[in-house]
Amino acid sequence: PQNISYAASSKHRSYHLLLRSTMRSVPSLFPAAVAMVFTSSSLSYALDTKSFNKIKSEYVNKEELSIITNEDDVESFVFLQKFPLEGSMGYLFHTEVLVCPRNNFSGDDQKMLDDKVTSLTDYVEIEESWWSDKTTNCVELGYGGASCAQECCSVPFGAEQTNFPLNARRAVISNADTATKSLYLYGRGDFDGVKAWHNACDSKCWSKWSGYDYNPITNNCNTFTSTILACVYGLSQKKPHLTVSDMVTVKCDELCKSTSFEDVFEDA
């Protein structure tokens, strides 16, 4: 778009230049409707540091190492929850992965989900009328920016994340429009969400996922969920209409695995 404002403060100008360069290289990602986001006012919103997907302050460095998975791998269903960002006119989005052990569902629910997995391509949306009353316990895997340098210090891993009801309208960041949640099924995994966290966080998995590693364009919450889906579970990383919120395709030569996960069991 030609109306990008260069009156923005200097701290934003590098992002303006990066965005202009990216837009020229991938014009197919910017239909007219999406381009509305990048008017002067919308771009200022997207690049304002207060509007980045910042982790809630109480979640920063929230890591309960005493929480471990069952020693036997637990077959699980892998979902993606999606929220628009507040004030973004529905054009910018935050996503998180929810991993729910199969046995936490009733037999009928397991069959319904199995049938969808059998026929899905990449992912399938799950109707709100089905999930809105499901209190099935899951693990929430989400990422955002924060003032911390330790690996995965910005991927909360406390009791609220490891006991996440499927129908909860909650996110690890503070500016997600949680009232407008949508849910998508991506498939099944051979292990639960706690082991997935260790596989992504015990050693580098695409990124170290510290708060300082966060970048609103190149290493954001949606890059993280792509990594969990593709590099931890081996599932599709395609997303449901995230437009410019999800511009990076992660690449992994092999699945990420914890180098110290066995030590967790030995120390437990």
Image: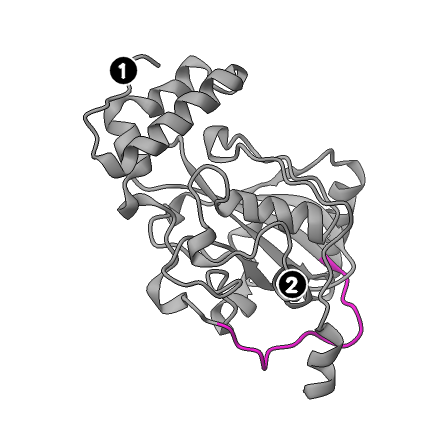
Quarter holding the C terminus? bottom right
Quarter holding the N terminus? top left
Instruction: Find residue 261 and report its image quarter.
Output: bottom right
Q: Earlier in the sequence, mark 1 or mark 2?
A: 1
- Tell me if 35 is positioned left or right of 260 in this view: left
Residue tagged 1: 3
Specify whether residue 74 is painted magenta: yes
User: Would you say residue 61 is visible in this rendering?
Assistant: yes
User: For the residue marked with disc 1, what is the amino acid?
Assistant: Asn
Specify whether residue 101 is painted magenta: no
- Tell me if 145 is positioned left or right of 183 in this view: left
Image location of residue 107, percent across then percent down: 75, 60
Image location of residue 187, percent across then percent down: 73, 47
User: For the residue marked with disc 2, what is the amino acid?
Assistant: Ser
Residue 9, above or below 262: above
Residue tagged 2: 203
Image location of residue 192, percent across then percent down: 69, 64
Q: Secondary structure at mark 2?
A: loop
Q: Give the residue at x 42% y 41%.
A: 216
